Structures are given as structure tokens and as C-alpha cells.
Image (tube, helix red, strand yellow):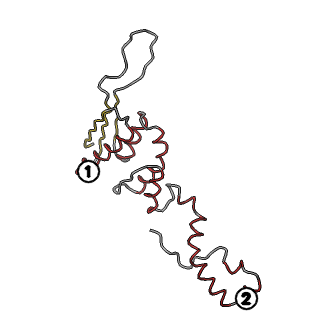
Amino acid sequence: MRGLVPQLENPSPYVTRLPAVLQEDEFLQRWLTAFDASIAPVVSVLDNLDAYVRPGTTPVDFLDWLATWVDVELDEEWSVGQRRRVVADAAGLHRRAGRFDGVLETVRLIAGPDASVEVVESGGTSWSGTAHGALPGSPDGVVRITVAMPGLGDRAEVLRRRLARAARRVVPAHIRTEIEITEA
């Protein structure tokens, strides 16, 4: 959490903007110092605004707010690095939602770097020069997500709920999802 920065100064003090004859007034100098002290944090934020809107440099307490810009729900149990990566990759993931690579990458982000992730989908597309050939995929229409994670313990059900919530967002609505979580 950010706080007040001691002795933070306004880079362009108000007293320097006054006509020369008023800059010599001692009362006016002291009075404008209060305004300089109150505006200095605002000027500092605006000068560094690009750092606030980049997931890699934004302050941790701004990360949740930044996640709402890209329509991502962050989990409090994720590490700060994992949360930053999810926010940074969100635009690309939204673009790939409904596709195999989008589902796989979403599951990998949620499961974390230690997990082994496998996604198997039953659908498919194919081209054949022979008429009346076999159709690709299987008729049951399912996406199977398998996650193997070391040291899982009691977290299996929490991870299953997270993955189910994410799958509802990235797997097409008419496709059933099966999630299996195992100890690696």
C-alpha cells in the first residue's frame, strides 16, 4: 500500500507561477506551500501513470483494479507474480477463448508453474478429398482437463472450483467440461 512520501515536492511550485512582485510576499509563499504539499502526490502519480497501468510495475494494491480493466478475476491465494502474469496475458487469452490453445493456456495460468496440465478435446476439423469419409473427433462433445500437481493436499477442491469457473469463461457453452486433479 502506498502512503505519503515525506518531503515530496511539487516539481513546479505555485509560488514560481506568480508574478515577480507577489513572489516576494512571505505570507503568500507559506500559504502556497500547503497547496504544493497537497498537489505533489497527484503530480507524482500522473508523471508515473504508465507504471500504474502496466501489470509488471503497478503497485500490488492496484493489481486487482487493473484486472477489472481486462475482465479477469484474481484469486487472493495466487502469488503476486502469478497475478501479474494473468493480468498481462488476459487480452491474448480473451482473443483465444473457445480455442484449444486458449483453454490450455488459461488452465496453465490458473494451475501455476508447478502443475502439469493436459487438455483433451473431442471435437476437430478435417479435410479430405474422399467423399463420405469419417468425421473427426467424437460425438460426445467434451473437454477433459487433467492437472497433476505436487504437494496438492487439501487444495484439490479449491483448484477444481477455480478451473471450473475459468472453463465456463473459455470453453464454448455447448461443450461439457470434465476436470480431473491428481497428485503429481
Q: What SS does tag 2 mark?
A: loop
Give the answer, above or below, for where 42 lies relative to 20.
above
* Three-letter code, disc 2: Glu
Q: Which of 97 and 182 lies nearest the eye of the viewer?
A: 97
Identify the residue at image location x=56%, y=77%. Answer: 38
Position of 62 with respect to 36 (left or right) is left
Image x and y of residue 26, in percent: 68, 90
Q: Are marks 2 and 1 in contact (CB under 8 Å)?
A: no
* Three-letter code, disc 1: Arg
How packed mark 2 is, by other alpha carbons closer than 10 Å (few <14, some 14-19, many 20 or more), is few
How packed mark 1 is, by other alpha carbons closer than 10 Å (few <14, some 14-19, many 20 or more), is few
Total labels: the figure holds 2
Q: Which residue is mark 1?
A: 155
Q: Which of 119 and 24 lies nearest the eye of the viewer?
A: 24
Identify the residue at image location x=73%, y=86%. Answer: 22
Going from the N terminus, do you reach mark 2 or mark 1 first?
2
Q: What SS does tag 1 mark?
A: helix
Quarter of the image that includes the N terminus: bottom left
Q: Which residue is mark 2?
A: 24
Q: Nearer the viewer, mark 2 or mark 1?
A: 2
Image x and y of residue 13, in percent: 66, 77
Give the answer, above or below, for where 162 lies relative to 2.
above
Q: Quadrant of residue 78?
A: bottom left
Identify the residue at image location x=39%, y=38%. Answer: 104
Image x and y of residue 52, in percent: 53, 60
Quarter of the image that includes the C terminus: top left
Q: Which of 43 and 107 lies nearest the eye of the viewer?
A: 43
Give the answer, above or below, for where 151 lies relative to 33.
above
